[in-house]
Image (cartoon, rainbow, N blue to C red):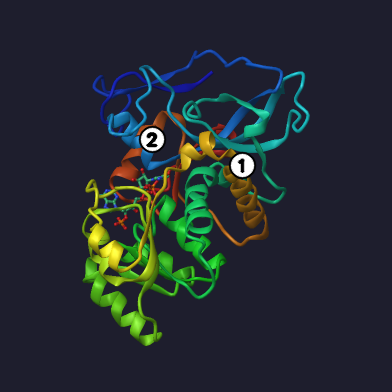
């Protein structure tokens, strides 16, 4: 089968044909066998790129698998073969799931307990982008911060993978949502979703801009801060937080880990949540299962949508990583299999 192999640590945006690329396409990678009676083999239809996949190949992610490895985490596809004890799935079912590695390949094997049926009417490619990005934001906002109607949510990196899911989940929860992104195209897109207020980082300071908005709505400050960026945007955003606010530490796309002063957290009764979604699979698998099922039901009802701004085939994976590196992505970038439907770049 076709699979993308990471054979060394390096820059995944280098063209794959270039000898300095850490990536290579294997056309004869072994098709994975079922590992137990409850195993299911899935023919992958689409797999999403997450910032973590990019960091992992750069050698900058907390989980460092031994080389060589097939990268990839969340995916969707069609059940190919099932083990003798599998009761919930049969060949042909449309499913999605997430793995710690291995979805940048034509086939992947999972245990049936880790698979989710994609509801009728949901686009299968889009479903491959749901588990990690939307899952992270759902667990953070709903399970950890208990976001409720009327609360003010501030989302940094709001046009990115996790950010765009957070603004949508915020609206589903009835929150007043403020989105922060850089550049007119991202801002226009966020405004088209009916977000309460959008800040363009290119045109001024978060603090003044958000304070002005809060004043027009007679609001005191921000109740929940969702931060996948860190750096200066996070530092500025802390000046906007209410007494009793929740800070969701999601990631550091800016490359700068923020410092949250404990003395101010004490005086203002802030709750700081470090959130590593993938570790819920080990420590709280039921939370992940309930969360993914709820998100799939929201997707089926049209309460959330998945915006795919870029899609490529496997041999163009370096372009997919470039889209993330160059901050071009609005929502998600996908690797799509099945040439008959013509996976294509929207760059
Ligand atoms: N904790 C968890 O379990 C978990 C789960 C998923 C992701 N994450 C983390 O969340 C972060 C975002 O992931 P993602 O998949 O949403 O990535 P993404 O789609 O690339 O979005 C990242 C956003 O961050 C903003 N950004 C600000 N400074 C940046 C910089 N120097 N380089 C790149 N982007 C920058 C960009 O927005 P503007 O261009 O508009 O500023 C971009 O839209 C990553 O650090 C990732 O590891 C954590």
Name the spot of residue 36 as percent of width and height, x first.
Answer: 67, 17
User: Picture coordinates of residue 33 (x, y %)?
Assistant: 61, 14
Label 1 vs label 2: CA separation?
Answer: 25 Å
Label disc, if present, on residue 62 of the rendered structure = none
Q: Is residue 307 visible to the viewer in this orientation of the structure? A: no
Q: Residue at x 44, y 75 (%)?
A: 196
The image shows residue 156, relative to residue 136, as above or below, that is below
Whichever of callouts 1 and 2 sits on the residue coming sooner in the sequence is: 2
Residues packed near mark 1 inside 10 Å, few (<14), some (14 to 19) or many (20 plus): few
What is the secondary structure assignment of the residue under circle 1? helix
Identify the residue at horizontal 31%, vertical 40% (top origin).
322
* Residue identified by numbered label 1: 286
> Of circles 1 and 2, which is in front?
1
The residue where tag 2 is placed is 53
Q: Nearer the viewer, residue 342 or 182?
A: 182
Label 2 crowd (10 A; few <14 / some 14-19 / many >=20): many
Q: Nearer the viewer, residue 51 or 333?
A: 51
Where 188 sits versus 28, above or below?
Answer: below
Q: What percent of the width, then of the height, locates residue 269?
A: 35, 66
Q: Is mark 1 within 8 Å of ligand 1?
A: no
Q: Is residue 213 above or below residue 181?
A: below
- Residue at the spot 29% in from the left edge and 48% down from the top edge: 253
Q: Quadrant of residue 44?
A: top right
Position of 149 compared to 159: left or right? right
In percent of width and height, residue 320 lies at 38, 39
- Identify the secondary structure beneath mark 2: helix
> Where does the N terminus fall, quadrant-wise?
top right
Foreground residue, 148 or 324? 148
The answer to whether residue 160 is seen in the rendering is yes
């Amino acid at each position: 089968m076709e699979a993308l192999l990471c054979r060394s640590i390096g820059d995944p945006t280098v063209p794959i044909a270039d000898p300095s690329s850490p990536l290579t396409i294997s056309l004869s990678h072994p098709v994975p066998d079922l590992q137990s009676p409850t195993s299911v083999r899935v023919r992958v239809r689409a797999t999403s790129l997450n910032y973590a996949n990019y960091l992992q190949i750069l050698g900058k992610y907390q989980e460092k698998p031994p080389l060589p490895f097939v990268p990839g985490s969340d995916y969707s596809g069609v059940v190919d073969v099932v083990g003798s004890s599998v009761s919930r799935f049969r060949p042909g079912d449309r499913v999605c799931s997430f793995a710690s590695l291995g979805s940048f390949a034509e086939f992947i094997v999972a245990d049936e307990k880790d698979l989710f049926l994609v509801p009728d009417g949901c686009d299968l490619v889009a479903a491959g982008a749901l588990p990690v990005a939307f899952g992270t934001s759902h667990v953070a906002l709903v399970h950890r911060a208990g976001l409720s109607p009327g609360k003010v949510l501030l989302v940094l990196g709001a046009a990115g993978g996790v950010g765009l899911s957070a603004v949508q989940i915020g609206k589903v929860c009835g929150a007043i949502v403020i989105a922060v992104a850089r550049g007119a195209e991202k801002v226009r897109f966020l405004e088209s979703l009916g977000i309460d207020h959008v800040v363009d980082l290119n045109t001024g300071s978060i603090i003044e801009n958000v304070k002005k908005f809060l004043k027009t709505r007679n609001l005191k400050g921000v109740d929940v801060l969702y931060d996948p960026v860190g750096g200066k945007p996070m530092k500025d955003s802390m000046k906007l937080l209410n007494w009793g606010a929740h800070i969701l530490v999601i990631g550091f796309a800016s490359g700068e880990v923020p410092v949250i002063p404990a003395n101010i957290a004490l005086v203002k009764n802030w709750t700081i949540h470090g959130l590593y979604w993938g570790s819920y699979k080990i420590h709280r698998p039921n939370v992940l299962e309930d969360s993914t099922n709820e998100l799939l039901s929201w997707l089926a009802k049209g309460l959330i949508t998945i915006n795919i701004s870029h899609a490529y085939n496997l041999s163009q994976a370096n372009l997919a990583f470039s889209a993330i590196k160059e901050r071009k992505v609005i929502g998600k970038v996908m690797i799509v299999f099945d040439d008959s439907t013509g996976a294509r770049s929207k760059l």
